[in-house]
Amino acid sequence: MKRVSRQDVLEQVLEAASDLAMTYFQKREGNLIEMKEPGDYVSRADRDVEELIRQELETAFPDDALVCEESGGIAGAGFWAVDPIDGSANFLSGNPLWAVSIAYVEDGSPRLGGIALPALGEVHIAEAGRTLNSEKSLAPAVVFGVGRNAKWNRDDRIAWENQAEGLDLNVCCLGSCAASLAFCASRRMAGYVEKSVYVWDIAAGAVLCAAAGLDVECEIDARTMRSDIFVMEKSARMSGQITFN
């Protein structure tokens, strides 16, 4: 019997999840909304898309563990990290900058990642150790992304923004870590930083950015399932213009 590859299944699951998410995005009126904590929203769309992803992955790989944003899970030596809709506030507001993010993590390192940007009609998939064939812009990116979350100290975040602005980079927050990392991998952003962010937000993007030839710093804490993430174009990093600490 031919063994099904994780990448093939990932492509299929991202397509199905994107279709379902777009159904909710195009008709948001009946989407029940809750607030998990200030500024952190969850809706029926999040839960239904996550359930679809969970069922598809469990069917294809019954021995694989899953760790999902809404339903949780227990990580094993190898596990899937799933964020059904990263950028829920954007999604619920009709803003197209949201993402479906799925990654396979093995021994603490993201090995396979896929990010779909359904409202933009984009899908990005990469495997660790392989080169991502992405279209590079003719001019260097001049936008640097800085994420926001309740666990990241505000003063430290502002210091990062000041450091990037000192390099004449335009600082922005897209409201979706996964979408930001997909933009970095496709060279539409020069870099991205966010501290104390969950594995399901960053694992797929870390694979994409490394495969695109960017410098990536990401070390997942197995206890908290959180990590800091720093991505930067090698030219700026090698020149010592910006540092991660």
Image (tube, rainbow, N blue to C red):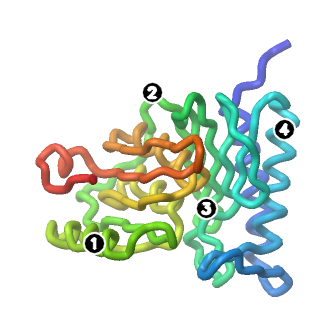
Q: Residue at x 62, y 55 (%)?
A: 116
**Mark 1: which amino acid?**
Glu
Residue 185 lies, with reference to residue 1, above or below; the image says below
Task: Pick whichever of labels 1 and 2 is earlier in the sequence.
Answer: 2
In the rendered structure, the answer to whether residue 183 lies left or right of residue 51 reads: left
**Mark 3: which amino acid?**
Ala
Q: Residue at x 71, y 80 (%)?
A: 35
Image x and y of residue 240, in percent: 13, 49
Q: Secondary structure at mark 1?
A: helix
| Camera-nearest label, 1 or 2 | 1
Task: Pick whichever of labels 1 and 3 is earlier in the sequence.
Answer: 3
Residue corresponding to mark 1: 161
Front position in the image: 70 or 136: 70
Residue corresponding to mark 2: 129
Residue 241: image quadrant is bottom left
Q: Dot 1 surroundings within 10 Å: few (below 14), some, or many (20 or more)?
A: some
| Camera-nearest label, 1 or 3 | 1
Residue corresponding to mark 4: 58
